[in-house]
Image (tube, helix red, strand yellow):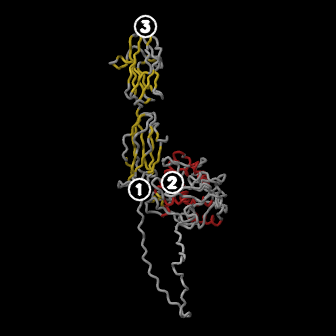
Amino acid sequence: MAAQFGRRLRRGATTTAVAALAVAALSASQAPAIVSGGGDGGGKQASGSSVPDGDGSASGDSSYHTDLPPLNTPNKPGTSIDLPGLGGESEAGIPASVLAAYKQAEQSIAITNPGCNLPWELLAAIGKVESGQARGGRVNDEGTTLTPILGPVLNGVGFANISDTDNGEYDGDKTHDRAVGPMQFIPSTWATWGQDANSDGRKDPNNIFDAALAAGRYLCANNRDLSVKSNLDQAILSYNRSNEYLATVLSWLDYYKRGTHEVPDGSGVLPTGPGPLNPGGSGNSPSPDPTPSNNGNSPSPGPSPTPENPGDSPSPKPPKPPKPPTTTPPPPTPAPTVQRLENAGTGKLSATAGGVFAERVSVRGEDAEGKAVGKVAVRFEIVGGTDATFAGGGKQATVTSGSDGVATAPALQAGENTGDFTVRARVVGRTVPAVDFTATVTERQADAVVRTSDKELTAAPGAEFADTVEVKATNQGQTAPGVAVKATMIKSADDASPADKGPYFKGADGSPLRTLEGLKTNDQGLLVLPKIYADDATGTFLLQIETAGGAKVTIELKVAAPA
């Protein structure tokens, strides 16, 4: 059984005796060395770090669970963190969705802030102390708690005094704030640090994926390197300004680093010490039924009968019935583990430049027997030299699969770069082969192109044409911006090969060019060609303009000597 404190630790209410008990218990569990916090519950320094300036903290310095890890660690240092579902101590089991959220947050921050060196075990330690791993993993398929987890009212009675900052949006209290969700953010802190880690369009403190990423980024603030002990202590103290809190979190951090395993959601061990789940510290046992009152329907009990011979010894009590044999409950069924990802019906991925892909990437997580595994965090990533993005502008998106094991990426938005790129899907936090999908961006197209003027184009031999040529491209009746255009001086209406005499464009070095490629229409679908020059040949010549998509228009150019 985990060592427990019998009272709530809170700012301004802890004692030296409690701090000493924490140090003694942690020493026995081989946790990292700490410095006792004294009697103020959060005003001292620990491990060479200083308490953050000001009174702010992520959780508002509200209550937290004071249970300590078992004195015997779940495994020896250096062993795998993915122990079998039935192995190790029960306290070492972390619910599947909660564990996935912690590992996803670690990997995300490793990309965006590699210098922080955030270990997911730190998030697990804080999540254990703050909410008992989201009430033992009582979350839905998207990772949102089945019921809100609220800390005490921060009205200055035993805790900080924080007036309402969210109009009760998150904590339901329009007078004072309360810490919210599995990582116990106060609304004012969530307003700054809240994240949308599961790409559902919401920053929800009650969602373990959102809350875990927000907690990670909060801990990494101020350029902290959490591999440095003083920075680690400072980060934890910024979450709750209590040295006893620091000691408790460090003990769980050490415990989880020595080994843990995944358990099914809803089957995690609930804390028995005080905290948001049981503020009075009385554990999780239901209250006994009240003594029934005498409502007049039942006779009041009379006085106890007096023995006939008061001096005689009372009659011996009848023997107690034998206890029924103790039965060992069957071990819990281990949660299915994802072993592979499969294409869940993704079709051809193709879009024109600047457009949205009609098809979305979808994968299905399966166990070794090919059965669906739900609640798996899948990261989708765009790979290759492309400016395509997911909806919202990112190159990565993490989605939690549903109960059918299927995870679908956000819609893909094509950029202006044409060609192929790769969308890669992989499981967060597990060594499972990734699945790659090829996506293709094609040129913008136009199904019609016309000249915007009907004025005759003429020039004298050896002179330049006075008027420029402007054309407009459309596609299905709509303006077609960014469409590639090719302009060619052709030999004749029956021969579209480039002419060897007649009007021409000039190259960068001034040499004649009779074919121009790489031209594109502007935002209004318009294109103005460069100036056109005439050589000594006279007659009527043809300029053909062709767009990506096959639209063509032929324009006459006349070269004649002045009258």
- In this view, the residue farthest toward the left is 494
Task: Tell me which numbered mark, 2 or 3, is placed earlier along the sequence.
Answer: 2
Q: Amino acid at mark 1?
A: Thr
Quarter residue 162 falls in: bottom right
Percent of width and height locating residue 8: 60, 64
Q: On the rendered structure, is 5 left or right of 537?
A: right
Name the quarter where the C terminus is drawn: top left
Q: Nearer the viewer, residue 236 or 154?
A: 154
Q: Earlier in the sequence, mark 3 or mark 1?
A: 1
The residue sitting at 42% across, 49% down in the picture is: 407
x and y percentages locating residue 34 in the rendered image: 61, 60
* Rendered view: 29 above or below 232: below
Q: How many marks?
A: 3
Q: Residue furthest top?
A: 563
Task: Give the numbered dot on residue 561.
Answer: 3
**Residue placed most toward the observer, 219 or 408:** 408
Look at the numbered disc 2 and give the secondary structure of its residue. Answer: helix
Which numbered circle lies on residue 337?
A: 1
At which x and y percent is residue 260? Answer: 48, 59
The residue at the point 41 percent across, 34 percent down is 352
Label 1 neighbourhood size at 10 Å, few (<14), some (14-19), many (20+)? some
Task: Say what amino acid the circle numbered 2 marks.
Answer: Ile
Separation of marks 2 and 1 at Cα, in angstroms: 20 Å
CA–CA distance in space, label 2 to label 3: 81 Å
Name which residue lies at 54% across and 62% down: 277
- Disc 1 element: loop
**Residue that label 2 marks:** 208
Picture coordinates of residue 417 (x, y %)? 45, 33
- Examine the image and state in which quarter residue 47 appears: bottom right
Work out whether residue 202 or residue 367 is closer to the camera in this orientation and state it: 202
Q: First in sequence: mark 2 or mark 1?
A: 2
Q: Which mark is residue 439?
A: none
